[in-house]
Image (cartoon, grey):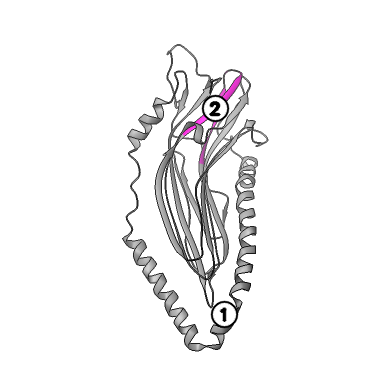
Amino acid sequence: MDHVIRESDAKSEPTVRRSNDRSEAFTAVHQAEIDHLVEARWKAQAEANARVFAAEQRAQAPILRMMEQDADAASAFRELAHLEREARVAQRDDLILATTHFRDAQARDALRSVKQGANIFVPPYDWQITDPVFKAGGSTADKDAGWFDSFAGWDGDHSGASWATAGVGVALKASIDGVARIAPAMFDTWNWEIFASLFSAYTNGVCKVVVQDPVSGAVLGPQGERTIELWHRKSQTSADGHGSDSFFASDIAPTVTLAAGQVFNVSFLASIFTDQSGDLAFGYSRAGCYLHVSLPLFTVHMNDNY
């Protein structure tokens, strides 16, 4: 089965179709390019956060020295931190997350923006991605169902940055010369939490679409990579957030120039980042988050006026 629906005359040929050779379409070369695209952002953020954490340690040094010399103050601080964490856990357990939007209605709204002659692709997709993952990050994906998750827990036993990426992808082939615009109907549900006292914690979540050459893994031009940020939070106290949304077409649609017969890879990704001090002798910061994305369909428009 070709897994493509075309809103056009039944006699006309699709301008883009599934590639016949999909077994080796996504290789270590493609994964390495995705690793670079994802981790460049997270490593830069981790380096900036490390400088902030070092400055916070210097700024808090007088307070820490005072607590080391006053057993009562140190005991009271530890008790207060414990009570604050218990209160945050209880608040989190009572939190009712926003329900996701009605998927059928979202899909209908997305399809209204699809022009006649668009190529529409649905699951199952060709591959699933669960890297890069670092430290406390985790990821899962299901190419047959078309969903993927990235997450990181708020374990206080470790310090520093963690990240995770998950996704699905498909190999396509252009039937004509032109400019292709890949527009995914991506539906997301997410939440993040920060518990902190004296030291900062960070969390960030993004979705990304990457279009790659099938051999070299290079990102195709003129704009073969698009990213949308869902949240970016820093706190030195405690905070949380959650939500659900959908994005389609211009929000995250790459455009690439193709030749007739050219095969190209498209990967749809969800990536998260957390950074924390962990539990210290005095003071702590923890961050955790979860991002779930479903991709029931995406479209490829060739030579549109947009």
Q: Is residue 19 something that shows in the picture?
A: no
| Quadrant of the image containing the N terminus | top left
Residue wearing tag 2: 181
Q: Left or right of 297: which side holds 45?
A: right
Q: Is residue 160 something that shows in the picture?
A: yes
Asked if the stretch drawn in magenta spans residue 178, the answer is yes
Q: Left or right of 84: which side holds 203?
A: right
Mark 2 in CB contact with mark 1 (< 8 angstroms): no
Q: In this view, does 146 lie above or below 47?
A: above
x and y, in percent, of residue 287 in the image: 49, 61
The numbered disc on residue 64 is 1
Distance CA(mark 2)–CA(mark 1): 56 Å
For this rendering, which residue is in front, 4 or 276?
276
Secondary structure of residue under mark 1: helix
For this rendering, which residue is in front, 163 or 285?
285
N-terminal of the two: label 2 or label 1? 1
Secondary structure of residue under mark 2: strand
Q: Left or right of 245: which side holds 44?
A: right
Asked if the stretch drawn in magenta spans residue 245, the answer is no
Residue ID at (64%, 54%): 44
x and y, in percent, of residue 171 in the image: 55, 31
For residue 124, which quarter of the picture? top left
Residue ID at (61%, 60%): 49
For this rendering, which residue is in front, 288 or 138?
288
Which span is picked out in magenta?
Answer: 168-184
The disc labelled 2 sits on which kind of residue?
Arg
How would you classify the magenta stretch by its main secondary structure? strand
Please tell me whether mark 2 or mark 1 is closer to you in this view.
1
For this rendering, which residue is in front, 225 or 33?
225
The disc labelled 1 sits on which kind of residue?
Leu
Q: In this view, does 213 lie above or below 68?
A: above
